[in-house]
């Protein structure tokens, strides 16, 4: 089973990389892109009986390692592929 | 007086730290591999700078799970002095031994230059021989040194006098112009509640001899020696841990 973990900086935390990407897009003329937040994407292949089990495992490893709760939050999607 | 210098895969200031305490300061020094749990009878533990585990995931995020870190935490809990320099500071943050986190430098550049720091507090083992407001000129070399803490945490750090070093101008004035990386409140170094665990981004170990452009960093290591010499009991407690 696949668990996809999306880690992003919390909205209250300044993201210098996202800001720079946004500025580059503005330079290219994409003024309609009003903001960019850069994050990390993890695709986990997990051994789990149910989607719920896969989600719980993904949340556990996100809390422990993948995300730093001081500055980041995360979102999980679970699927067969 | 024995210093343990912890070596993680990717540490690259471990030899600088070893040289500073052994050859310049004249103390004993021992390297401790990150998979070991024996701190070699150390009186002081140094987590050196570098790029542990290639800075993958987040700086210090993987090193904090090294076996040696449980021993370092126990040593610190027993009152033993621990200093994390640059990547060592990042590891202490990830380990939760110090509060906050590091963001990418606000200008996104890896910064390799000398900066000025104002010593804010002298009531830590690593600043005991400094004077309050003293200005130290030390090198920095980091890409993720932009200190961040949630507003309540930052307020507590300030209220409890746990900001130990701030980026400043050569005259010691703290201003945005002297802030190389965007750190909140110009924070360059902090300590824990018990004040025996200190982390800072600049490199005192690379500034212990005039030939290196500055010898201002030596006071950090001299301080901990003097501090421990005056606290024989603390050493015994730390040893037992």
Image (cartoon, coloured by chain):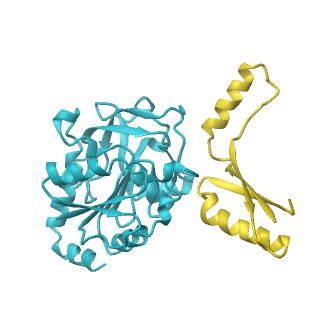
Chain colours: A yellow, B cyan
**Furthest residue to the bottom?**
B240
Asked if residue B51 lies left or right of residue B133, the reply is right
Asked if residue B61 lies left or right of residue B158, the reply is right
Residue at 75% over, 63% down: A45
Residue at 79% over, 23% down: A31
Residue at 47% over, 34% down: B110
- For the residue pair B197 and B141, the one nearer the viewer reads as B141
Q: Is residue B114 above or below residue B26?
A: above
**Furthest residue to the right?**
A80
Q: Is residue B158 visible?
A: no
- For the residue pair B218 and B30, the one nearer the viewer reads as B30
Residue A23: quadrant of the picture: top right
Task: Name the spot of residue A30 as percent of width and height, x first.
Answer: 79, 23
Task: Name the spot of residue B105 as percent of width and height, x first.
Answer: 51, 38
Task: Name the spot of residue A19 as percent of width and height, x first.
Answer: 66, 33
Residue at 71% over, 66% down: A59
Asked if residue B178 lies left or right of residue B219, the reply is right
Quadrant showing the C terminus of chain B: bottom left
Quadrant showing the N terminus of chain B: bottom left
Task: Name the spot of residue B206 as percent of width and height, x first.
Answer: 27, 42
Q: Is residue A16 visible?
A: yes
- For the residue pair B91 and B33, the one nearer the viewer reads as B33
Q: How many marks?
A: 0
- For the residue pair B96 and B205, the one nearer the viewer reads as B205
Residue B124: quadrant of the picture: bottom left
């Amino acid at each position: 089973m696949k668990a996809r973990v999306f880690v992003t900086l919390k909205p209250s935390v300044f993201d210098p990389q996202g800001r720079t990407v946004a500025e580059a897009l503005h330079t290219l003329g994409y003024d309609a892109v009003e903001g960019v937040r850069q994050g990390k994407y993890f695709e986990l292949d997990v051994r789990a009986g149910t989607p719920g089990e896969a989600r719980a495992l993904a949340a556990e490893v996100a809390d422990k390692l993948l995300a730093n709760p001081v500055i980041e939050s995360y979102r999980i999607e679970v699927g067969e592929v | 007086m024995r210093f343990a210098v912890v070596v993680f895969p990717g540490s690259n200031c471990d030899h600088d730290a070893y040289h500073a305490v052994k050859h310049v300061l004249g103390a004993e020094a021992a390297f401790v591999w990150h998979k070991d749990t024996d701190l070699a009878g150390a009186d002081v533990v140094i987590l050196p700078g570098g790029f542990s585990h290639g800075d993958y995931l987040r700086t210090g995020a993987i090193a904090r799970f090294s076996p040696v870190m449980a021993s370092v935490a126990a040593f610190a809990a027993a009152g033993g002095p621990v200093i994390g320099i640059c990547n060592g500071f990042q590891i202490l943050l990830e380990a939760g031994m110090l509060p906050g986190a590091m963001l990418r430098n606000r200008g996104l550049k890896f910064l390799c230059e000398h900066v000025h720091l104002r010593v804010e507090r002298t009531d830590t083992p690593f600043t005991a021989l400094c004077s309050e407001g003293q200005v130290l000129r030390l090198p920095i070399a980091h890409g993720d040194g932009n200190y961040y803490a949630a507003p309540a945490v930052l307020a507590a750090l300030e209220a409890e006098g746990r900001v130990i070093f701030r980026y400043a101008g050569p005259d010691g004035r703290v201003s945005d112009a002297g802030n190389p990386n965007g750190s909140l409140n110009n924070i360059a170094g902090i300590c824990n509640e018990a004040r025996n665990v200190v982390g800072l981004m600049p490199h005192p170990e690379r500034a212990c001899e005039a030939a290196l452009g500055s010898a201002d960093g030596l006071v950090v290591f001299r301080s901990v020696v003097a501090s421990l010499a005056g606290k024989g009991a603390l050493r015994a407690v730390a040893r037992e841990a």
